[in-house]
Image (cartoon, helix red, strand yellow):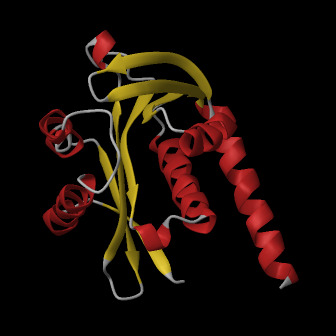
C-alpha cells in the first residue's frame, strides 16, 4: 500500500482533516459525548497547532491525527508537554505498517520542531485492544469514569517514544529487506 503523511499546512489540507475526522468520528467507540468531542476537534487548527493526514495512492484521506502543546490542567502553559487530540485511520488502514509510519512521522516532526518537548500524553477508551497497544508505548497514569465509559490517560517521555518509533521503523525495514 502506498501512502504519504502530510502536515495540514494550508486550508485545503485543513479542510480534508476536518472532513475526515467528522466523517469517521461517529464510527469510533469513544467515551465522550459526540458534541463534547466535536467541540475539541478544531482546536489544533484554531490554535495553529499540529494536524496531519495520511493520503493513499489516489490522494484520498485514510488517516488523521493531531496534537496540542500543553494541557488543560495547566492552562496550556506547559509547552514542553504534547497532548495528542486524536488518531483516526480508515478501517482498511488500521494496520501495524500504517501506525508505525504515522508514529515515526509524528516523533520526527516533534523532534524537528526544536520546542524541547519532554512528554507526550493521550487518553483512550478503556478497551483491551487499545490497552495492549498503548501499554507498549506509554505508562497508564490514571483512569476516569465518564457517563459513556472509562477512559485512561497514558504518558511517555518524548525521547522514549522517539526511540521506540525509530526502533519499530528499523525493524520494519529489516523485514522488508528480507522479503
- Decide if residue 48 is on the left or right side of residue 3: left
In the image, residue 152 lies at what x, y percent?
A: 47, 25
Count of numbered marks:
0
The residue lying at 14 percent from left, 41 percent from top is 46
The residue lying at 76 percent from left, 52 percent from top is 167
User: Does residue 118 show up?
Assistant: no
The residue lying at 37 percent from left, 75 percent from top is 55
Q: Nearer the viewer, residue 16 or 113?
A: 16
Looking at the image, residue 68 lies above or below residue 77: below
User: The C terminus is located in which quarter?
Assistant: bottom right
In the image, residue 35 lies at what x, y percent?
A: 12, 37
Q: Specify the quadrant of the image occupied by residue 89.
A: bottom left
Q: Specify the quadrant of the image occupied by residue 62.
A: bottom left
- Decide if residue 175 is on the left or right side of residue 11: right
Looking at the image, residue 89 lies above or below residue 135: below
Looking at the image, residue 33 lies above or below residue 74: below
User: The N terminus is located in which quarter?
Assistant: bottom right
User: Does residue 45 show up?
Assistant: yes
In the image, residue 32 lies at what x, y percent?
A: 26, 33
Q: Specify the quadrant of the image occupied by residue 30.
A: top left
The residue lying at 25 percent from left, 14 percent from top is 75
Q: Residue furthest bottom?
A: 58
In the image, residue 169 lies at what x, y percent?
A: 70, 60
Amino acid at each position: 500500500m502506498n501512502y504519504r503523511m502530510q502536515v495540514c499546512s494550508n486550508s485545503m489540507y485543513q479542510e480534508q482533516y476536518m472532513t475526515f475526522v467528522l466523517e469517521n468520528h461517529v464510527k469510533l467507540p469513544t467515551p465522550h459525548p459526540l458534541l463534547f468531542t466535536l467541540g475539541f476537534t478544531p482546536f489544533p487548527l484554531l490554535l495553529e497547532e499540529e494536524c496531519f493526514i495520511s493520503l493513499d495512492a489516489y490522494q484520498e484521506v485514510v488517516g488523521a491525527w493531531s496534537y496540542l502543546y500543553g494541557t488543560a490542567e495547566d492552562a496550556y502553559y506547559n509547552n514542553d508537554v504534547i497532548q495528542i487530540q486524536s488518531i483516526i485511520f480508515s478501517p482498511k488502514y488500521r494496520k501495524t505498517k500504517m501506525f508505525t509510519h504515522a508514529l515515526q512521522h509524528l516523533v520526527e516532526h516533534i523532534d524537528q520542531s526544536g520546542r524541547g518537548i519532554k512528554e507526550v500524553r493521550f487518553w483512550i477508551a478503556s478497551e483491551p485492544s487499545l490497552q495492549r497497544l498503548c501499554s507498549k508505548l506509554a505508562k497508564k497514569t490514571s483512569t476516569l469514569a465518564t457517563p459513556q465509559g472509562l477512559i485512561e490517560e497514558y504518558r511517555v517521555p518524548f525521547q522514549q517514544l522517539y526511540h521506540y518509533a525509530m526502533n519499530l521503523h528499523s525493524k520494519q525495514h529489516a523485514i522488508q529487506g528480507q522479503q
